[in-house]
Image (tube, grey):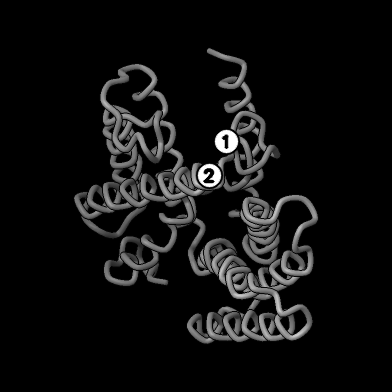
């Protein structure tokens, strides 16, 4: 194994107890951890478009909007929160354009809005889930990434989407799919309220979402000409490199959990 591989394992071993502790404690600890992850990931996302201190007021605005979205009361309507965020960004556009007549004011608004919807608004969904559901989402996502990494490294073979992610293979995709189904089915069999095949389907669906999330961030980095979103996690890169799959898995799980009662009383 390479030094990078050892770094990946060590980083994961250090982060897992923190995640387990946050899940066990629930709010406000869970919201605090979500806030840290969301804000760090958001700054990495903005740095892809605005490196260094460029557009610092936009980054500060995004930071505080992110905290507002994470900590907003759970009984507040999510659609209303999105609309409020949109209106806040629209006001930002008016202020910037009035002062500087900046031709890039509206594209900057789009980057600002997409960032806060892509990270804090999605991660906020974790506050609606039980500890068991959060564990299932995290472990299934982790299984997708780990299974794909080892199967792809061992078997190699044809690439899935080389123009987007030149290293990802069909063997890795299938390995991650099998791992996700196995983990999800095992958790459902041990703790779930639905039949095992519902969890097998859930594992397959979440794996596809995880792969799409990975491809999305890979495409974004390739478009911006960067290798990693950041450096804060040795062996992984940035926060966004670690949670790209989760950002697609979490909303899909919430959507499916609203249709199927996977855990007794567990519908968001």
Q: Is residue 8 left or right of residue 32?
A: left
Q: Is residue 56 left or right of residue 87?
A: right
Disc 1 packing (10 Å; few <14; some 14–19; many ≥20): few
Q: Position of residue 158 (x, y in %)?
A: 26, 25
Q: Earlier in the sequence, mark 2 or mark 1?
A: 2
Task: Judge whether 123 appears above or below 65 on screen.
Answer: above
Q: Secondary structure at mark 1?
A: loop
Residue tagged 1: 227
User: Residue at position x 42%, y 28% from top?
Assistant: 149
Task: Judge whether 249 appears above or below 143 on screen.
Answer: below
**Residue 252: quarter of image:** bottom left
Q: Secondary structure at mark 2?
A: helix
**Residue 39: quarter of image:** bottom right
Tell me if residue 22 can be seen: no
Q: Is residue 87 left or right of residue 141?
A: right
Q: CA distance from mark 2 to mark 1?
A: 6 Å
Q: Position of residue 200 (x, y in %)?
A: 24, 47
**Residues at badges 2 and 1 in contact (C-beta under 8 Å)?**
yes
Residue 221, numbered circle: 2
Q: Position of residue 77 (x, y in %)?
A: 51, 85
């Amino acid at each position: 194994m390479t030094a990078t591989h050892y770094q990946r394992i060590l980083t994961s071993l250090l982060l897992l107890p923190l995640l387990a502790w946050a899940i066990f404690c629930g709010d406000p600890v869970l919201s605090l951890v979500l806030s840290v992850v969301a804000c760090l990931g958001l700054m990495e996302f903005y740095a892809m478009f605005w490196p260094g201190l460029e557009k610092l007021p936009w980054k500060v605005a995004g930071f505080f909007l992110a905290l507002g979205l994470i900590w907003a009361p759970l009984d507040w309507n999510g659609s209303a929160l999105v609309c409020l965020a949109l209106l806040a960004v629209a006001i930002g556009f008016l202020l910037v354009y009035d002062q500087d007549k900046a031709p890039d004011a509206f594209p900057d608004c789009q980057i600002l809005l997409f960032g806060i919807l892509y990270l804090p608004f999605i991660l906020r969904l974790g506050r609606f889930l039980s500890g068991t559901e959060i564990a299932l989402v995290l472990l299934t996502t982790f299984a997708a990434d780990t299974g794909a990494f080892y199967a792809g490294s061992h078997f190699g073979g044809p690439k899935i989407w080389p123009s987007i992610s030149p290293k990802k293979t069909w063997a890795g995709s299938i390995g991650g799919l099998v791992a996700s189904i196995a983990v999800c089915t095992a958790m459902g069999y041990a703790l779930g309220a639905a039949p095992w095949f519902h969890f097998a389907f859930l594992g397959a669906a979440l794996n596809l979402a995880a792969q799409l999330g990975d491809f999305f961030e890979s495409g974004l980095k390739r478009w911006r000409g960067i290798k990693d979103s950041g450096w804060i996690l040795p062996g992984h890169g940035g926060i966004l490199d670690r949670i790209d799959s989760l950002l697609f898995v979490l909303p899909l799980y919430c959507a499916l959990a609203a249709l199927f009662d996977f855990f007794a009383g567990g519908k968001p």
